Image (cartoon, grey):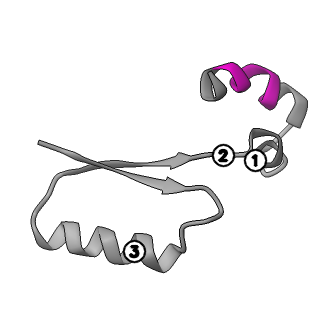
Amino acid sequence: DAVVMLVRWKKTPVKAVQSALALLQGTRAFIAGVALTQMDLKAQSRYGYGDSYYYYANYRKYYAD
C-alpha cells in the first residue's frame, strides 16, 4: 500500500501538509508522493525557467484534460 497526498495549490497551508506528512510517517505509511491539485497553469508557468508560453503550451493538455 502507498499514500499519495493531494494538496490544493496555493490554498493548503504548508504547515498543514507538514503536519499530515509527519502523522503519516509516524504510522510508517509508504508516502509515494505529493500531488498538487487545481493548479493555475498560466500562473505556475511564470515561476519556471525559460519561455512561459512554451511551458504552458506543452503541458496545458497534460494537466488540464
Q: Position of residue 4 (x, y in %)?
A: 32, 47
Rounded to the nearest whole Å, what is the CA distance between mark 2 and mark 1? Answer: 7 Å
Q: Give the residue drawn at x 14%, y 73%.
A: 26
Check disc 3 and report the residue beneath it. 18
Which type of secondary structure does the marked residue at label 3 adopt? helix
Asked if the residues shown at circle 2 and circle 1 are in contact, with their CB atoms under 8 angstroms apart, the answer is: yes
Residue tagged 2: 39
For residue 21, side relative to residue 27 (left or right): right
Amino acid type of the residue that numbered disc 1 sits on in the rendered structure: Gln
At label 3, which amino acid type do we have?
Gln
CA–CA distance between discs 2 and 3?
20 Å
Write down the residue under mark 1: 44
Instruction: Please identify the quarter of the rendering in which residue 50 is found.
Output: top right
Residue in front for this viewpoint, 19 or 49: 19
Q: Nearer the viewer, mark 2 or mark 3?
A: 2
Query: What's drawn in magenta, residue-wise?
Result: 55-61
How many other residues sit within 10 Å of disc 1, few (<14), some (14-19) or many (≥20)? few
